[in-house]
Image (cartoon, rainbow, N blue to C red):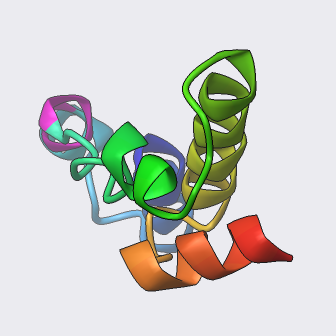
Amino acid sequence: VAQAVMLQALDDPAMQLEILMPLARAWEPPAFPVGAADLLARGMAQGKALGEALRALEAQWVQSDYRLGREELLARLAS
């Protein structure tokens, strides 16, 4: 978000970073929509692989700018 705010400020000189940056700093990403229970319900066993799968899904979610939903993420797990 901070990067988007800075890019917008570059495109619009009237925007002041000192006004917009506090908004970007205060932003918090939404809650990750997938949990261990989702993977366990799909037959994955507890353990290292489950944690690795969750981290991989979370990385994809962040890469998507938090746009991927629960079902989309779980579908990626199967592929």
Of the pair 71 and 27, the residue shown nearer to us: 71
Q: Residue furthest right?
A: 79
Is residue 30 toward the left or the right of residue 37 in the image?
Answer: left
Is residue 52 toward the left or the right of residue 30 in the image?
Answer: right
Q: Quadrant of residue 76?
A: bottom right
Residue in view at x 40 percent, y 73 percent: 70
Residue in view at x 56 percent, y 51 percent: 62
Residue in view at x 24 percent, y 29 percent: 25
In the depicted structure, whether residue 46 falls above or below residue 69? above
| Main secondary-structure element of the magenta-colored stretch | helix
> Looking at the picture, how far across and down is residue 36, in whole percent?
40, 39
**Is the C terminus in the top left, top right, bottom left or bottom right quadrant?**
bottom right
Q: Is residue 28 visible?
A: yes
Q: Quadrant of residue 41?
A: bottom left
> Looking at the picture, how far across and down is residue 17, in whole percent?
31, 41
Residue in view at x 19 percent, y 41 percent: 27
In the depicted structure, whether residue 63 falls above or below residue 23? below
Asked if the magenta segment contains residue 39, the reply would be: no
Is residue 14 toward the left or the right of residue 48 in the image?
Answer: left
Region in magenta: 22-26
> Looking at the picture, how far across and down is residue 10, in whole percent?
55, 60
Of the pair 61 and 55, the residue shown nearer to us: 55
Is residue 53 toward the left or the right of residue 34 in the image?
Answer: right
Q: Is residue 69 visible?
A: no
